Every structure is written in C-alpha cells, then in structure tokens.
Image (cartoon, rainbow, N blue to C red):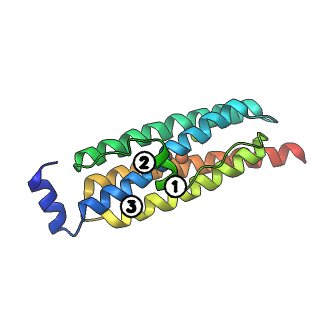
Amino acid sequence: MGTKGREILKERGINVEELVKILNKAFADEWLAYYQYWIGAKVAKGIPREAVVAELTQHAADELRHAGMVADRIIQLGGIPLLEPKQWEINTNCGYESPRDPDVRTLLDQNIKGEQCAITVYKKLIDYTKDKDPVTCDIALKILEDELEHEEDLEAIKEDIKIMCK
Ligand code: FE
Ligand code: FE
Ligand code: MG
C-alpha cells in the first residue's frame, strides 16, 4: 500500500500503525494456534485418537494459512510481520497451552478455549475495520468463519466422546 492508500485509511479513521499492531497480535495467535494443533496431533492419546488427530491436523493447516493471510495484509499496510518466534509469546492475545496432558479430552478443551479466544479477536477486528478498511475486514471475516467452524468441529467430537462413554 502506498502513501495515498494509507492517507485514505487515515481519513476513514484508521490508524495504520495501530492496525498493524492488532494484526501482528493476531499473527502471533495464529502461529501459536498452529503449533498447539500440530504438536497436539503428534502426542494425542485416548479414544477416538484417529478422529482427533485428523481434526487437529486439518486445523493446524488452517491456522498456518491464516498466519499467511494476516502476514500478507500487514505487508500491504506497510508493516512488518513479527520476525522472531519469541515475539509470538509476547504479542499473543490467546496464548499457548502446552499439550502436557496428551489425553484427547484435555486437548479438545484446550483447543476449544483457543478457538473461542480467536473468535473474540476476529470479531473485534471486524468491528474495528468495518466501513473503514473493507480489505482487512473481509480477511477477518473469512478467518472468523474458519474459527467458528473449528470450535463447532471440536465441540462435536467432545459430544461424540460423551455418547461413547455413556
Ligand atoms: Fe486461525
Ligand atoms: Fe482455529
Ligand atoms: Mg475441522
């Protein structure tokens, strides 16, 4: 994005530097979510292990794709995506939950919590950019749709477990 593009966003009430900071926090979240899913899928134990591993692996791929979408927008806005992994921990909204307990039920609960946080983050970003920066708003909406689906998928597996254990 050039000088004029930034000027237009400014006229619409968007502080580009602040927006880049918000996007970098979401970027940190996406990387941590990616790793939480990815490593969770590797260490998962319990029943139904295969269904959980398949879902976590698919979600990991989605989170990595989200990181790419957010990074591309940061760069378009003239910003720099966080360059150091250690900055992910510092900038994250939603944090990282280690799969120290590899039980599939614990992993599901941890990841559901993460998705609920992500949903809040993208809803806020939509509110922040609505009618002001339609490009960022559209990216946030696309990601929000995925996060809503992730939450639903994990909750559905949790329900299946309940039914199985009865
Ligand atoms: Fe995501
Ligand atoms: Fe997600
Ligand atoms: Mg899914």
Query: Which amino acid, by three-letter code, is at mark 3?
Result: Leu
Where does the image place residue 51, in percent across and percent down from the top left? 71, 33
| Neighbourhood count class around disc 3 (C-alpha, 10 Å): few under 14, some 14–19, many 20 upward | many
| Residue 61: percent from left, percent from top | 51, 34
- The 10 Å Cα crowd at callout 2, few under 14, some 14 to 19, many 20 or more, is many
Pointer 2: what residue?
27
Q: Nearer the viewer, mark 2 or mark 3?
A: 2
User: Is 10 placed above or below 68 here?
Assistant: below
Disc 2 residue type (three-letter): Phe
Residue at horizontal 22 percent and vertical 70 percent from the top: 13
**Horizontal placement of 4 versus 12: left or right?**
left
Q: How much space separates mark 3 and mark 1, taking CA atoms?
A: 11 Å
Q: Which mark is residue 87?
A: none
Q: Residue most toward the right?
A: 166
**Residue position for label 3:** 125
Mark 1 CB within 8 Å of ligand 2:
yes
Q: Ligand 3: give its quadrant.
A: top right
Instruction: Give the class, few, some or many, for how many residues have Cα within 10 Å of label 1's Cα (few <14, many ≥20).
Output: many
Q: Gap in Å between the C-alphas at discs 2 and 3?
A: 12 Å
For numbered disc 2, what is the local secondary structure?
helix
Residue in the foreground of this view, choosing between 123 and 166:
123
121 left or right, relative to 80: right
Q: Looking at the image, is mark 3 or mark 1 earlier in the sequence?
A: 1
Which amino acid is tagged 1? Ala
Q: Residue at x 76, y 39 (%)?
A: 102
Please report whichever mark, 2 or 3, sits nearer to the chain's N-terminal start.
Answer: 2
State the residue in front, 145 or 99.
Answer: 99
Q: Are discs 2 and 1 less than 8 Å apart at CB?
A: no
* Residue 84, x across and y down, in percent: 42, 42
- The numbered disc on residue 118 is 1
Q: Which of disc 1 and disc 2 is earlier in sequence?
A: 2
SS type, badge 1: helix
